Amino acid sequence: MSLGTIGKNIKLNNGALIPFMGLGTWEISNADVIVKEALNVGYRCIDTAVLYGNEELCGDGIVEWLKEDPKHKREDVYYITKLWNNQNGYSTAKKAIADCLQKVKGLGYIDLLLIHSPTEGRQMRLDTWKAMQEAVDQGIVKSIGVSNYGKKHIQELLSWDGLKIKPVVNEIEVSPWCMRQELCDFTNSQDIKVIAYAPLSHAYRLKDADAVSVAKDKGVTVAQVLIRWSLQKGYIPIPKTKTVSRLPQNLDVLSFELSETEMAKLDHPNVHDPSDWEVTECP
Ligand SMILES: NC(=O)C1=CN([C@@H]2O[C@H](COP(=O)(O)OP(=O)(O)OC[C@H]3O[C@@H](n4cnc5c(N)ncnc54)[C@H](OP(=O)(O)O)[C@@H]3O)[C@@H](O)[C@H]2O)C=CC1
Ligand SMILES: O=C1Nc2ccccc2C1=O
């Protein structure tokens, strides 16, 4: 990752551009308020999911922001949502995608639709992908991707004879305590970008002594250090905060740089401590 490109939009394998980082919205119940505030302070990418139950509120926040100023354009915001596990299967996914769009109808289209996880088995994964490809052909979804996919799930999709559209991203948990170096390298080798979820370790490691020491040296917070670590690794982090006062801080990660020594101090290649679920190895 060339440091000079951090902070710029990132080109996906279909030519579309995705913002360099985004806002996670899991467990944000007033997502309309938080999303609008986030857009006002400069966030341009919002990550939600059917699971989170706040897609409509995220859409409302975006639409409110668009209405606020004629200079605010739909194409300046990147809206990500995900089909939940029980929405796998061709006809179920077709209906679910229509529902996803209906919930944010003011947006007109979904920038990026993900299959939330690979847990439902090969046939369901591929049938779901078929429906997702058709949503791109229809123009209601601009890009499609996967989440929580391990190497074998990506290989399965890339070698499927029904593949017409490659996934643009794999959204997986990545932080210094869940580095997944092999999976990240494999994902990137296939020209698929890594969206790093739980980049703040779901807040479990914010008191880590090494991270605290790096943050102190740099004069920034541990949250900022972790987001910067993710960017310097070449990932697209989606830190979540429901605290309005933390929104600007988490975005303010372009004015400092971590040295190789600091990056190495943060790395924990031998630790594998996901903050949430771990399904990348499922059959
Ligand atoms: N595809 C998938 O399977 C998954 C996707 N995700 C996505 O990734 C996003 C991020 O992951 P998430 O699990 O939310 O965890 P994060 O790693 O983003 O951590 C969020 C926690 O950090 C706290 N926090 C945020 N900023 C700061 C700060 N500056 N200082 C101190 N504490 C801070 C938050 O508190 P507070 O909110 O109270 O401010 C919250 O407790 C999710 O919201 C979701 O969009 C997450 C898990 C799985
Ligand atoms: O953000 C998320 N938090 C989760 C917890 C369990 C399963 C999926 C998720 C998410 O997508």
Image: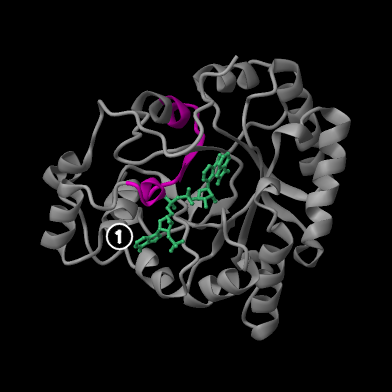
Q: Quadrant of ligand 2?
A: top right
Q: Nearer the viewer, residue 124 or 261?
A: 124
The answer to whether the residue bearing label 1 lies less than 8 angstroms from the nearest atom of ligand 1 is yes
Q: Position of residue 215 (x, y in %)?
A: 18, 58
Which residue sits at x=51%, y=33%?
A: 277
Q: Nearer the viewer, residue 152 or 121?
A: 121
Taking 165 as reference, is 70 above or below it? below
Give the quadrant of residue 217: bottom left
The stretch in magenta equals 186-204
Which residue sits at x=76%, y=43%?
A: 136
Residue type (three-letter) at the residue carrying disc 1: Gln
Name the residue that disc number 1 marks. Answer: 224
In magenta segment, residue 88: no
In magenta segment, residue 203: yes
Q: Is residue 63 left or right of residue 147?
A: right
Q: Is residue 16 visible?
A: yes
Give the quadrant of residue 64: bottom right
Q: Position of residue 165 (x, y in %)?
A: 69, 32
Q: Position of residue 4 (x, y in %)?
A: 30, 56
Q: Position of residue 246 (x, y in %)?
A: 39, 70
Q: How is the image coloured?
A: one colour
Q: Is residue 161 visible?
A: no
Report the quarter where the N terminus lies.
top left
Taking 230 as reference, is 183 above or below it? above
Taking 229 as reference, is 246 above or below it? below
Q: Nearer the viewer, residue 4 or 43?
A: 43
Which element is circle 1 on? helix
Report the quarter where the C terminus lies.
top right
